[in-house]
Amino acid sequence: MLKPLGDRVVLKVQKEEEQSIGGIVIASNAKEKPTTGEVIAVGNGRILDNGQRVEPEVKVGQSVVFDKYAGSEVKYEGEEYLVIRENDIIAVVD
């Protein structure tokens, strides 16, 4: 499994369902990029200037909302993941 470093988080992006407007299917390149995902793995946290480590606020299994263009897409064992910094996470979905 992928183990993120520092304040990075590995997400499984939730794909949006195919939409149609008035019977017209929207092309995949015209769709908005998904901004929600499930936390798959969390790094150890970021290190402050004084050397203290700040524990991550998110936990594995949580659903989160993140910035639209954040992170790097990674393929691992046939699955696609998104690796982002924790500060790119906007909210946790309850």
Image (cartoon, helix red, strand yellow):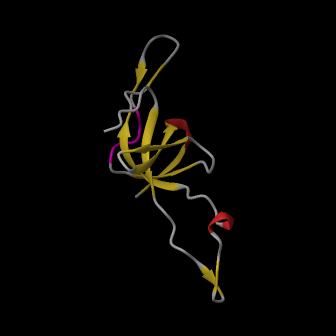
Instruction: Please name the residue shown 64% across and 66% down the image.
Output: 31
Q: Is residue 10 magenta?
A: no
Q: Say above or below: 26 vs 65.
A: below
Instruction: Please name the residue shown 64% across and 62% down the image.
Output: 32
Q: Say above or below: 41 vs 64.
A: above
User: What is the tally of numbered marks visible in this picture?
Assistant: 0
The extreme front residue here reads 78
Instruction: Please name the residue shown 61% across and 81% down the image.
Output: 20
Query: What x and y, as percent, mark residue 88?
Result: 56, 41
Q: Say above or below: 56 vs 91.
A: above
The quarter holding residue 77 reads top left
The quarter holding residue 35 reads bottom right
Query: What x and y, as percent, mark residue 15?
Result: 48, 63
The extreme left residue here reads 1
Magenta stretch: dominant secondary structure: loop
The extreme bottom residue here reads 23
In depth, the one of 63 and 13 nearer the eye is: 13
Q: Which residues are magenta?
A: 56-60
Instruction: Please name the residue shown 62% across and 51% down the image.
Output: 68
Q: Is residue 58 magenta?
A: yes
Query: What x and y, as percent, mark residue 14?
Result: 46, 60
In depth, the one of 56 and 17 nearer the eye is: 17
The extreme top residue here reads 50
In depth, the one of 91 and 7 nearer the eye is: 7
Q: Quadrant of the N terminus?
A: top left
10 left or right, relative to 22: left
Q: Quadrant of the C terminus?
A: bottom left
Query: What x and y, as percent, mark residue 56?
Result: 41, 33
Q: Say above or below: 27 vs 62.
A: below
